Image (cartoon, rainbow, N blue to C red):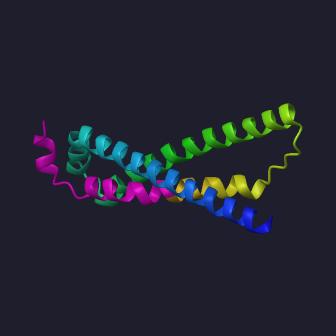
Amino acid sequence: MSSTTNMMTVLLACIAGISLLVGGIGIMNIMYVSVTERTREIGLRMSIGAKGRHIMLQFLIEAVIISVMGGILGVILGVGASLAIKMIAGWPIYIQMWSVVLSFAVCSVTGIFFGWYPARKAASLDPIEALRYE
């Protein structure tokens, strides 16, 4: 029984890791599109004095907000599904607060990790070229 439980834990961890990777790639793609669509805005902000770190921070915060909103939705769906299983199947359910906090920490780290490269790309744009961008 212990061997089966350990195998299921490893299997669920692998599935969660793959889901996290796919979600992170989705965040990176969204951020790339955001940088591309807002190239003129970035150039304008840089031309009036915004530094690269300000632009980078703006896009990193945006990536973290996107990932945390996904985390909030995931926690709501997870708690709702757990309560539904408790009511339908009668299984005992205990939701630990540390797991909810850990999920938000993972969401934030995912947003920073996968939002870093698009944010760096936005921060390194040449203001003159960005203003010319159509």
Q: Main secondary structure of the magenta part?
A: helix
Q: Is 116 within the magenta?
A: yes
**Which residue lies at the image location 67% right of the left edge and 64% below the top edge?**
7
**Which residue lies at the image location 73% right of the left edge and 63% below the top edge?**
4
Q: Does residue 85 appear to the left or right of 39 in the view shown?
A: right
- Image location of residue 14, percent across then percent down: 56, 59
**Count of numbered labels shown in the rendering:** 0
Q: Is 4 within the magenta?
A: no
**Which residue lies at the image location 36% right of the left edge and 42% below the top edge?**
30
**Which residue lies at the image location 47% right of the left edge and 53% below the top edge?**
111
- Magenta stretch in the rendered image: 110-134
In the image, is residue 68 above or below residue 102? above
In the image, is residue 61 above or below residue 77? below
Residue 29 in sight in this render: yes
Q: Does residue 12 appear to the left or right of 29 in the view shown?
A: right
Q: Quadrant of the N terminus?
A: bottom right
- Image location of residue 16, percent across then percent down: 57, 54
Residue 61 in sight in this render: no
Please, which residue is most extreme toward the bottom here?
3
The answer to which quarter of the image holds residue 12 is bottom right
Q: Does residue 15 appear to the left or right of 53 in the view shown?
A: right
- Image location of residue 35, percent across then percent down: 28, 45
- Image location of residue 60, percent across then percent down: 42, 53
The answer to which quarter of the image holds residue 2 is bottom right
